[in-house]
Amino acid sequence: MDEILYDFGTGRSDPSTFPVAALQAAATKVIAEQIEPLTNYPGGLGHEGLRRAMAERESSREGVPVDPDHIILTNGSMQAVTLTAEALQVDKGDTVIVEEFSYPGTLSAYRSLGYEMHGIGLDEGGMRMDQLEDRLQSLDAKGKRPKFIYAISTYQNPTGFVMPKARRLEMIDLAARYDIPIVEDNCYADVHYEGEVEPAIFALDDNPQHLYLGSLSKILAPGLRLGYVLARPPMLDKVLARRHDAGSNVLAAAIAAEFYKDGISEHAAVSNPVLKGKRDLLLDELQDHMSELCVWSKPVGGLFIWVRLPDDVNLKRLMSEAAARGVKYLPGISFHYEFAKAPYLRLAFGHLNHNQISLGVPALTAAIQACRTSNEPVAFDSLFD
Amino acid sequence: MDEILYDFGTGRSDPSTFPVAALQAAATKVIAEQIEPLTNYPGGLGHEGLRRAMAERESSREGVPVDPDHIILTNGSMQAVTLTAEALQVDKGDTVIVEEFSYPGTLSAYRSLGYEMHGIGLDEGGMRMDQLEDRLQSLDAKGKRPKFIYAISTYQNPTGFVMPKARRLEMIDLAARYDIPIVEDNCYADVHYEGEVEPAIFALDDNPQHLYLGSLSKILAPGLRLGYVLARPPMLDKVLARRHDAGSNVLAAAIAAEFYKDGISEHAAVSNPVLKGKRDLLLDELQDHMSELCVWSKPVGGLFIWVRLPDDVNLKRLMSEAAARGVKYLPGISFHYEFAKAPYLRLAFGHLNHNQISLGVPALTAAIQACRTSNEPVAFDSLFD
């Protein structure tokens, strides 16, 4: 097996900014002071301190009040992905709407549960509302009502795109007209580098049928497995009724709550500039090495860059040619809702160091060149046709 | 609302033996030394160190080898309860076998998922094999094959009973004849006070269709939400395929693994005698106050005593009469697979102090006496008729 030197594969946080001393202090404090919650079952909502911290996080970013008792802590946002679908009473064979390219964890869960997924095309503003409307109309004509629309509207995985506010309002309007809940996955929230932050859908529409997923995996660390659902009554009780695990990890939640007792901005002010530096370097290297060959997204947040490959690249061979050069990435097909072949790949930059990024891009470039089946100049200048 | 002075309700560990200093030291160490797993996704199996520790735990108790790669860490054993049912492809309306009185968390999950439960009667040796055989026969005659048998065979919740080895072998034989997997919930394992330990079913039968559930909630603390499934191929992959949460909490698992690096017996040697002291005191108080009124189990491990009430007690009134005296307990009906009224209650003693036990029993006795509807002497002398 080839040694992986340049692992652009997994969407991980940056190990170099993992706050060792602060987490040690938080752990030491809560293990001594929170014996009562640690030796008890947390209940469906979970550790109150972390719920308050996450309500404050959402409220201060979005400028709307968030009730800590509407936050349900989960085992990462992935538990929230299936829990919300179950709460919306999706059964095998039921229809759900997803982005054409989306997070493989979600797609894999929905696939495993037998949901009939309909993928809606993306552009630089995320899910396309013209395509969504067409699809809802054609499904409606067949008497099918999708159980929900799943969307990663900010720093979308894999593209990195952010849906503008106007389009969010269009989506809210479409969802209302067809009476379909939106499951908004905002797990990259607060990994923000520059410019305005677009408002979350839950902050634009207080319709309680919509559900919102959050996470600490990207702003702190995925090994803590801390995510949450924001659900308003009566959806709140429907989500709680489908959780059968007696509640989320109190120890990790208590440590994270103590760490974030002064808000999340303190650690974000340390970790985001480090991630931004890696994004900048990766964009520079792509420009230096691939400008004649590929186009790519320029995300203002999140952990990913989405790269469009020349149409004449042998995609299967590219995996092994890249691996032979020490490069790992996730191919476009992994993100497609029905595993269609697509001339894309995703580069995750969060946990590589600068040297790995600088050496990895030319290695990947060489692999792409080696897999082209023609000498034609590359014709496209957009991520999408 | 009445103040709860004597909370015999929840099956919790003992807060006084919660190992604060050792967990603080473990947390300090792993947060510094395990940055790589903490900043990554754990995968379906989970933290390797805790899997090794739990394999060693099971192997040393049962005297059979246990492969750490057959252990799947879960969010408490409650996540394992639904995960194993899903892996066994149980769908709404499918038949499963449970003990007539069993853990409310499991019964509630199965009920919520729409399983058709069949409860098998208990005696001092746990689930009755004559009744199980009759039920399997009658279901078979109707063309119904139960998807699995769920049993808490050691320190059964709520009764505290242990199934003897001979009966375990009978159950294994019946399961083989009818080709039904056994889901063995051993979450009270190692909370052992005296006498021989009966072997686990997985140690008596290496048929890979059986599944085994373990937990750290009772020997350490439920707030850590650490449980596991022991599954052998090909069942192992079926369980993994149904998990969609990207793996269990690495932080809590790493801390527990460090805490248990020399095995689990060191902490059990501290915590079990404390729990045994409470069990002894509760048995003494019951003998002193209720010997003319009730009969009860004398468990050799676990956290519960099961009390049979006089048949003439008004069970509904008893809840409020007890509450008025500061006593909380769980009534028999909570443990019945179809919520049948039953003249029983369960006393959990793990987290009360000695004073609370000594004052709580006479208060409960007075409540029982106040709720009798006759002056007849109590006729039964067994927990079961």
Image (tube, coloured by chain):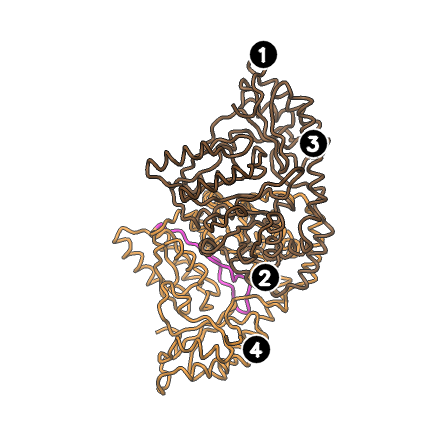
Chain colours: A orange, B brown
Nearest to the eye among marks 3 and 1: give it: 3
**Above or below for B358 versus A20:** above
Give the CA separation, mark 3 to mark 4. 63 Å
Seen from the viewer's position, the closer of residues B151 and B172 is: B172
Q: Which disc is residue A221 wearing?
A: 2
Based on the picture, tell me whether residue B38 belongs to the magenta stretch: no
Q: Are marks 2 and 4 on the same chain?
A: yes
Does the CB distance between marks 4 and 1 fall below 8 Å? Answer: no
Does the CB distance between marks 2 and 4 fall below 8 Å? Answer: no
Element on which disc 3 rests? helix
Magenta region, residue range: A179-200
Mark 4 belongs to chain: A
Mark 2 belongs to chain: A
Q: Which residue is drawn at the image coordinates 44% and 69% (left, top)?
A: A159
Element on which disc 2 rests? loop
Q: Are marks 3 and 1 on the same chain?
A: yes
User: Considering only order in the chain, which callout, 4 or 2, is on the residue closer to the N terminus?
Assistant: 2
Count of labels in the image: 4
Report which residue position mark 4 lands on. A356
Does A15 sit left or right of A200 as displayed? right
Q: Residue A98: x, y in percent?
A: 39, 59
Element on which disc 4 rests? helix
**Can the viewer see residue B260?**
yes
Q: Residue A243: x, y in percent?
A: 49, 46
Q: Which disc is residue B375 wearing?
A: 1
Mark 1 belongs to chain: B
Nearest to the eye among marks 3 and 4: give it: 3
